Image: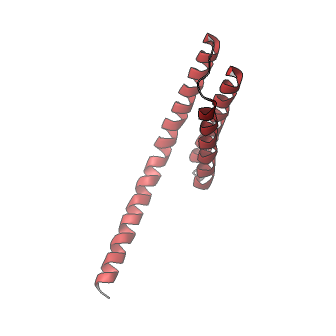
């Protein structure tokens, strides 16, 4: 069971790496697909419940968690400017619609 848990953490890290590669390439569709895969893997891990890990496995799990968190931070750094631009675009579009409706 504990080897399964580590395998799940490794799969999550691999999915997070795919997310990061997609974000670096500005491939937003691929990022969304990889994010869904990562969420599926996290759900599978959660379904396993707690595991009794030895010290080596705990270190490996912690290393994988730190890796995933580092990927997540970089993904956020890459996506925040894009999301901010999208938000401004949507706000401008909404404003334009309101103005158009007001003058109909």
Q: Quadrant of residue 59?
A: top right
Where is residue 77 drawn, in percent x and y?
46, 42
The quadrant of the rendering that contains the C terminus is: bottom left
Q: Indicate left or right for 21 with 3 as reference.
A: left
Q: Identify which residue is drawn at 60% across, 37% down.
A: 42
Rendering colour mode: secondary structure
Is residue 25 in view from this perspective?
A: no
Q: How many marks?
A: 0
Where is residue 9 drawn, in percent x and y?
63, 29
Q: Residue furthest left?
A: 102
Where is residue 15 drawn, in percent x and y?
64, 39
Given residues 101 and 3, the one toward you in this image is: 3
Q: Residue furthest top?
A: 55
Given residues 73 and 2, the one toward you in this image is: 2
Where is residue 48 drawn, in percent x and y?
64, 30
Given residues 44 and 26, the one toward you in this image is: 44
Q: Is residue 17 above or below residue 32?
A: above
The quadrant of the rendering that contains the N terminus is: top right
Q: Identify which residue is drawn at 29% across, 86% down.
A: 103
Q: Identify which residue is drawn at 57% across, 53% down.
A: 28
Q: Identify which residue is drawn at 56% across, 27% down.
A: 65
Is residue 35 in view from this perspective?
A: yes
Q: Is residue 94 above or below residue 65?
A: below
């Amino acid at each position: 069971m504990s080897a399964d848990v580590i395998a799940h953490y490794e799969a999550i890290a691999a999915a997070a790496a795919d997310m990061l590669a997609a974000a670096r390439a500005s491939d937003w569709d691929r990022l969304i697909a990889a994010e869904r895969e990562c969420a599926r893997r996290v759900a599978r891990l959660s379904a396993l419940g707690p595991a009794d890990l030895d010290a080596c496995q705990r270190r490996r799990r912690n290393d994988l968690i730190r890796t995933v968190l580092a990927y997540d931070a970089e993904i956020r750094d890459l996506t925040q400017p894009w999301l901010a631009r999208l938000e401004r675009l949507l706000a401008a579009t909404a404003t334009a619609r309101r103005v158009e409706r007001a003058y109909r």
